[in-house]
Image: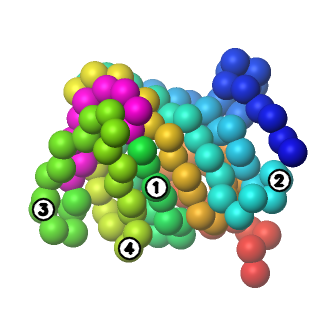
Amino acid sequence: MIIRRLEDIIGTEREVKASNGKWTSRRLALKDDNMGFSFHDTLMHAGTETYMWYKHHLEAVYCIAGHGELENLETGEIHPISEGTLYLVNQHEKHILRAFDTMRTMCVFNPSLVGSEVHTEEGSYSIDPTIE
Ligand code: 9YT
């Protein structure tokens, strides 16, 4: 069993900040935990708009605090996001998440992130080079 507390990873390399300052991802479970997914407690900072295109990953995002909206760029649909809302990026859709206030989201990635990934210019994370 692995027990890990948010307070113990803040300020460590498991706390990853986007280079553009839009989000902070506290990576509670990563590839080296061998769970088949990674699990993050991520803050989307107030007033930000983040474009994403996870070409190599599936992602589940469960909002536990804050308010915002999700724009599916494949369909043009806009969905309100608040506490208790889950969205699943199941088809590698390009999307934009806008945080009206600080949004706290629990994010699950498959395949797992290794740990240090930040978005590339195209809004994706690189695929783990060790995956065959
Ligand atoms: C909701 C979302 O995808 N935010 C961007 C950061 C990412 N999920 C992460 O690495 O925690």
Q: Decide if residue 20 is in sight here.
A: no
Q: At 21% across and 69% down in the image, what residue appears?
A: 74
**Which residue ends up furthest to the right in the rendered image?**
1
Residue 81 picture quarter: top left
Q: Earlier in the sequence, mark 3 or mark 4?
A: 3
Q: Residue at x 38, y 73 (%)?
A: 91
Instruction: Count neighbours of disc 4 (C-alpha within 10 A) and say few if under 14, some if 14 to 19, many if 20 or more.
Output: few
User: Residue at image x 87%, y 45%?
Assistant: 1
Q: Position of residue 5 (x, y in %)?
A: 73, 26
Q: Which mark is residue 60?
A: 1
Magenta segment includes 41? no
Residue 54: percent from left, percent from top: 46, 62
- Which residue is label 4 attached to? 91
Query: Which segment is the magenta one?
Result: 63-71
Expressed as whole percent of the image width and height from the top left, the position of residue 11 reads: 70, 19
Cα gap from disc 3 to disc 1, whole angstroms: 20 Å
| Callout 3: SS | loop
Please tell me whether mark 1 or mark 2 is closer to you in this view. Answer: 1
The majority secondary structure of the magenta stretch comes to strand
Q: Nearer the viewer, mark 3 or mark 1?
A: 1
Q: Which residue is mark 3?
A: 76
Badge 3 amino acid: Gly
Q: Residues within 10 Å of mark 2 (few under 14, many from 20)?
A: few
